[in-house]
Image (cartoon, coloured by chain):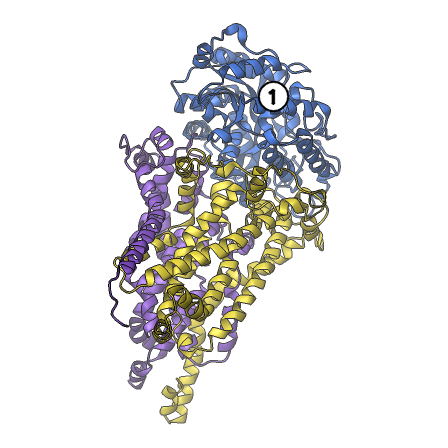
Chain colours: A purple, B yellow, C blue
Amino acid sequence: MKPHRWTTGRVAAQSLLYAVLTVLAVVYILPFLIQIATAFKTDPDAASNPISLVPNPFSLAAIDKLFTNSDFPLWFMNSVIITVFVTLGRVLFDSLAGYALARLHFRGRNVIFAGLVAVMAVPNVVLLIPKFLVLNTLSIYDSYVGMIVPLMADAAGVFIMKGFFESIPVAVEEAARIDGAGTLRLFWSVVLPMAQPALITIIILSFQGSWNELAHFIVAAQNPALTPLTKGVATLASGSLGSGTQYPLKLAAALIMTLPVAAMFFVFQRRIMNQSEGAVKE
Amino acid sequence: MTTVATRRTDGVRRGSIRKGETASSWLFTAPVLVLLGLFLVIPILMALWVSFSDWGGRGSPFSAGVNFVGLKNYEAITSGGGLAEQNFGQSLRNNLWYVVLVVPIQTVVALVLASLVNNQRLKGRGFFRTAFYFPSVTSSVAITVLWLFLFNTTGAINKVLSWLGVHGPNWFNDPQGVLHAILGAFGVTSGPGALVSHGFLGVSWWDWLAGPSWAMSALILLAVFTTSGTFMLLFLAALQNLSGDLQEAAMVDGATSWERFTRITLPQLRPTLFTVITLGLIGCWQVFDQVYVATDGGPDGTTLTPAFLSYQASLINQDWGQGAAIAFILFVIIIVFTLIQRWVLRERAVSKRRRLNPPPVKVAGLPAGEAER
Amino acid sequence: MSRSLTRTVLMGAVAASAALALAGCGSGFGSSNDTGNGGSGSTSKLTSSNDPLTVLIGSSGDAETNAVKSAVASWSSSSGTKATVIPANNLDQQLAQGFAAKKPADVFYLSTGSLPGYAANGSLLAYGDQLPSDLKNDFYPSLVKNFTYDGKFYCAPKDVSTLQLIINTDKWKAAGLTDADYPKTWDDLATVAKKLTSGGTTGLVVSGQYERLGAFMVQAGGNLTNADNTKVTADSAANVKALSYAQSLLKAGSMKFAADVGAGWGGEAFGKGLGAMTIEGNWISGSMQSDYPNVHYKVVPLPEGPKGKGTLQFTNCWGIAADSPNQKAALKLVEQLTSKEDQLQFSKAFGVMPSIQSAASDWKQEFPEYTPFLDATDYAEGVPTLKNVAPVITDLDGKIAQLKTTDPKTILDSAQSNLQALLK
């Protein structure tokens, strides 16, 4: 491109651009700042100064109540358990199936592929009630198994892995095959380590997906001991911990449940954001 | 790919590898197939049966006491003039307004955001991208709780509006349609008789045209807030993929930046635009979480959606047959949109590069966006 | 918001509907999906085993949960049968899931609204007639009627609640009102509400729903159905008069709905001083004590309407599942939980009123300031108890919330046709 000269018009345009961007950024960020501030407010302060970013007085009552006088820690632990297992399951199953579909030759491959495409079209929400019926028939309703295993079914992840395996050269596998490695060993010790970038994508997705899932947990269990964060905080929102609006309490709960996904987002931020660029520049 | 096997010319050896391949192929795909079969295919068949049965919610729907009742459940929600029909009609109405407003707004917002942060010389573009994308990673439950606070009658939004001299609506408690409210401001409080006395699915045409309620409008803003970032990434990827040559040529020709955008950039973005719109259409028909957390379908049923109504009919009101029937009608609606999407994406599959390397943005963003709704 | 409203309603001892023998309605059950363990209606044989019991409750908060837990624990230690109390996140949904899974809680809170549906599909054990007769005859007859479906007395009422007028005494005095000014008539109420309205305070703030304004209907001589739930009377002139009266208060600005002042329910608006009066049930005592201990208030009877005294009454029962493997123990537990001692204990813990007549005098002695609530059991009327009535009431509540700008007749006509559909 040609070098641009800095005319007055251009400076004005630039300033306008930054002004617009700044306003937009404020609109997108302010709600979260308000959330953080409100989590440390008292109930009356939150009600009368809903916008103020400075809690006055500063109060840890909401956080304290969450951790000492509610099931919040239990919900958190359940979410962690579920997320870890769902993620492990998806990483393994998606990469296995993705590899088979990308590299191995067998009859029925096309049928399976077509089936996966069809399955991806099924909206999750529609399955809410029937999923409950199946869990119930399988006798895994109201258990960790019933909450975790169905979430491991993930056609989209298979596609991601398949796409990845198709994009990397076969040379390494070839070499290993010549050394006489069987398919399973080949997969385990050669293919999987190579797939790390795609696996991280799967991890990000399944972490986010299972941590934020609500509908499935509503139908998969009813025992309070199995309540994960989404379901628990949804209950909080409808006011079961007592009466009153208790916004600081609710917002603190919502805030804490956002922290892990936020942390993951910032850790993998470059990856998530730059993938777009990487993909394009090929 | 077959080169691996064919290069080892020894026929026997090749056969044995093939054999091993078939076995391990099935072994590799089995877990996914079993899971999808159990938790996607069978549930669909089961729900199909329940939607044609009088199962009352006790024990298995396949037990002997459960009868086939034909289309009775479908009839109850689509004709007959009862409350079930009204509720279903209202849920479709609400969701239709949601789709009609969310899809265009989020698409335009995402495109604008992407264009703004695409500039390579922009300082702090990483920051801006992060700011716009961040809402997309939060859970729908957490963000809905925040929304309830912000849109509270005496909350932050109304406070800001009051600075502007506007008396804000009672967001989550006001069932009045936004268009009705606007007409009301001009003194029109009741519709023409033809619209009021005729209707579809138990909802008068006048009410179909009411616009989303204030409560639904808050949810619409929530959807735009949480998904525009995801789609911004999609547009960003596409924008960066555009060839600079055309732009340069146009610049030499003295085209203004607006002309360059509408004549050159926009046509090139068409595939992405289609993707974003169809994905938006599909996702918007699945609103459940926000309704469950924030409104329970209220006020006066104006945030009911088919997905939530299906849940409510089955698990709260014990009308399992009707709940399943609603789910199936919703299924058909979404399938129609999905087919449209497949048909649109088919064009893109022509590009070999894309097929080999599926756009990772989609990977990172989309399911999140879908989950969000 | 409306969720918390719903919960509030549940909290006290709910709204909407209940039993009542509807001829023909129950004919579908009891057929082939009974698995020989007692099943739907057959009450002669109770299941018995060593299985521990689960008790599912829709709790209003920690106070209620802890009280029920300790009552159940003491029964456990004396009977030797283990029992766990589970506070539900969403009682209706969890009950439905339990029944469908054939893994229901053994004992659970059951609202009048949920009874007909579960009775009809055979999920409930109709154990009422197996209660000791001195206990059975001690329940208020109107409550027994609430939990009778298809001629069978299904479950023991666990409590009763009524609505009355709650007055903030500080605001009352500040407005220059005295004890002589407690409203006796609708006109009185309009007058005092107007006097109490000033600045950020509205004279009367109530939850905008049938479960509160229905009290006016009863005072005008109406209600949604007749006492036997055999005839729908939603569009009666009395009901129109009641809602028109409420509408006049709304239009005058001396009454507002809780949602419109930014509160989840009447009690919250009252506690926060947004309203000087509210119409709530006896459950309000618990939240006043824990959330608004500094607000001074007094409970007085609601004013009389054109047809004299009137208010609404709500109740819940202790349901026992037909699929429970240990019904014998469950029945024993329920007997204990409905005993005078336990019920009075619950009253102290979270403000409910006993469902048995013999506990009335003790209760009044214990809570003299709340006697208007208990006195009202003589004249209070229940809410409709038809199968599938819940969505109809939800729909009606949604419309009542818009009463200020909607014609009462329109609201009631639609309720009439929706309720009529349930009778068929």
User: Which quadrant of the structure image shows residue C99?
Assistant: top right
Quarter holding the C terminus of chain C is top right
Question: Label 1 is placed on what type of residue?
Answer: Phe
Front residue (pair A202, C172)? C172
Where residue C53 sits: x, y (%)?
A: 49, 37
| SS type, badge 1 | loop
Quadrant of the image occupied by residue A74? top left
- Residue A201: image x %, image y %? 34, 64
Chain letter behind tag 1:
C
**Depicted B222 relative to depicted C291: above or below:** below
User: Where does the image place residue C311, in percent across and percent down from the top left?
Assistant: 61, 20
- Above or below, B277 against A247 in this view is below
Left or right: B267 in relation to C112: left
Q: Pointer 1: residues within 10 angstroms few (<14), some, or many (20+)?
A: many
Q: Which residue lies at the image location 50% right of the left edge and 30% below the top edge?
A: C260
Relative placement, left or right, of B10 versus C11 is left
Residue A193: in sight, yes or no? yes
Residue A265 visible in the picture: no
Residue B89 vs residue A178: left or right? right
Residue C353 placed where, x, y %?
A: 53, 20
Q: How many marks?
A: 1
Comparing A53 with B36, the one in front is: A53
Residue at 36% in and 28% down: A44
Q: Which residue is mark 1?
A: C139
Foreground residue among B24 and A91:
A91
